[in-house]
Amino acid sequence: MTTAETFYRVATDTGGTFTDFVVFDEHANDYTIMKVPSTPDDPSRAVVDGLEALCARGIRPDRIRVFMHGTTVGTNALLEERGARTGLAITAGFRGIYETMEQSRPFGPAVFDLGYTKPAMLVPQSRTVEVPERVTFTGDVRVELTDEAIGEAVAALEAAGVDAVAICFLFSFMNTDHENRLAEALRRAHPEWFVTTSADLLPQLREYYRLSTTVINAYVSPVLANYVARLSDELDARSVAVARRFTMQSNGGSAPFGKTAERGVSTILSGPAGGVTAAIGLGEITGRDNIITFDMGGTSCDVALVRHGIALVSDHNTVDGRHLAVPMLDINTVSAGGGTIARVDDGGGLRVGPRSAGAVPGPAAYGHGGTEATVTDADVVLGYLNPAWLLDGDLPVDAAAAHRAIDRVAEGLGVSTLRAADGIVRVVNIKMAEAIRAISTERGFDLREFCLIPFGGAGPLHACQIAIDLGIPTVVVPATPGATSALGLLMSDVRHDFVRSLLSPLAELDPATANKLFDEMATAARAQLSSEGFSEEQTTLEYFLDMRYAGQGYENAVRVERLPLGAQDLARYRQVFDEVHRQFHGHAAPDQPVEVVSYRTVATGELPDVRLARMHAVDTPVEDAIIATRTAYFPVVSKEPIDVDVYARKRLRPGHRFDGPAIVEQYDATTVVCPEQTVAVDEFGNLIITGTLA
């Protein structure tokens, strides 16, 4: 119950099937979790439903003073092509940049796809306006932007019936005047339009990537802004965290609600980023800094690699074939979740995904009208999931419906229901294992040096077998796997990224020029964080130089340890760049000239830490945690289902150990421990699973 001293921090993560809540009690230094069904038509309704449920538990909304949110609204708007009707203003003569893209098909399976087509343009040529203006690569004006040209551009966009406008002129990052003047004219003429400029959003080299990112921002931001406004109204009505509301960004940090609406492109991986942040925090307290995160939910599986406690971040990313050049955690996503649908194709082969049953109607086992076989239904048939209920009884399970759904797949394959279910799980496991290989072994990392941290509602169900298949020696299952991403939101600090491009040979770079650029970004960063309520003591700035060998088409970031820079510092960072290039690409060229392409500043506003409480060890036997015996299928032991012990997670305490095969049930997830694996419970309640490797 709420006391006079009790304040809360609440994090909510909207997913495809469930919306997760984590409520952190600042007085007790403890947290609780809760799940409510997602509402895909309007995700804010699920958030409001969760707040009402918290009220029913005695938590007063006005005692919530920090509200963190991970959202898929921007992601879904992009993937489902349901963004704003967007127009594009571009330098005359360059309207083909967006349609041409990179002129070639992407890497991966598309290389061999004879029927490959590029993704549809979010802004067609009919809503693209060529503006007579021109700035050179040095920032000099070659063709002046006239008032007449501005008026014609405004009229053309009005005729196109747009709701949002992206402005991307050639070399505008060197001279922002033309973009700013057009943006001001558009806002005066149509205050209701969302207008974004590339010079403000992404002032850096590479015309197509800057253009694509600006278009995506204009496309998704109005949708996200409407959502944030609705949610803000609901939070205002309940006096929830009036001063501190944040949205998770793709870069692993959060941003205030107001900034969310301006830079929707920064939230494309909002939800998955929270899970990576939580895994890093978990790695810190367990002494593990080489981690593979494995987030399997209802519709997708997200995996990421953490090396020496630092998650890989990329500033050139692709989402559904569309390119973004904003910093994002390097997360690999595949369509593999509990709701992923299995079917038999025309050739009699088993296919699992990419379609998902989602939250509505969901798997057949959930009893909400779903009839198609899903991974969750296969897990029920195999005995891995409770055949009667999930979520501590809040979600009844219709095991008969799950069997009927798998039966139809089995008939198409000509095999037994058990073999069909096992086949579905094997196929989806292979797909997720391939996603892990893509971010690890294919980049030269040895998986034997990593541990696997599974979370999401379905992650612990499949993680142990995948670890065996990939040769990962240790699996660490968090105390609340189903809400780990939401917990990560509470662990994240506010982060803003600043970038400025200025191409110059390193040997000719005047340190004063570099120091001036860094000083300008630092001033803007401090002002930004100060306006958001962060003191100088709560502000941290990091600096990076994006460098490349002369003529290369890509850069690597080199951390700048201190400012101001001197000539000797630049010479030393030249050597550091060689080592960074060797680490990431396998070779270096110390005798080749190096260029500095861009300057970056990462500004962090530090929020109070969320410290996970240690659990008290008990001397009760581990057998007291066994609540049932269930038949489950482990083909390495028997061709028929065998009896296995089912443990209650809430009864497991530090010091408890037991061997697989076994099943561990808790409110938000189920963990399946494979034969010849051993489970130990650590002081934070994590399950440390080790055992035989393939």
Image (spheres, rainbow, N blue to C red):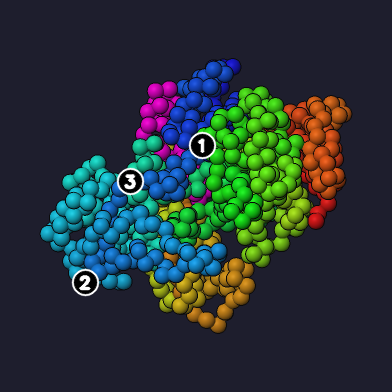
How far apart in space, not on screen, are marks 1 and 2 (Cα)? 49 Å
Q: Residues within 10 Å of mark 2 (few under 14, many from 20)?
A: few
Q: Could you say which disc has been placed on residue 142 in the image?
A: 2
Q: Magenta stretch?
A: 228-257
Residue sitting nearer the eye, 544 or 333: 333
Is 326 or 508 nearer to us in this picture? Answer: 326
Residue in view at x 81 percent, y 46 percent: 635
For numbered disc 1, what is the local secondary structure?
A: strand
Q: Verify CB contact (< 8 Å) between mark 3 and mark 2.
A: no
Which residue of the protein is positioned furthest toward the left in this rendering?
148
At 68% across and 49% down in the image, what residue appears? 413
Q: Amino acid at mark 3?
A: Ala
Do the CB atoms of the residues marked 1 and 2 lie less than 8 Å apart?
no
Q: Which residue is mark 1?
A: 14
Q: Is residue 251 magenta?
A: yes
Residue 178 on image: x %, y %: 23, 60
Sequence-wise first label, 1 or 2: 1
Answer with mark 1 or mark 3, whichever residue precedes in sequence.
1
Q: Which badge, 3 or 2, is on the more N-terminal residue?
A: 3
Residue 163 shown left or right of residue 529 in the figure: left
Report the residue marked by disc 3. 84
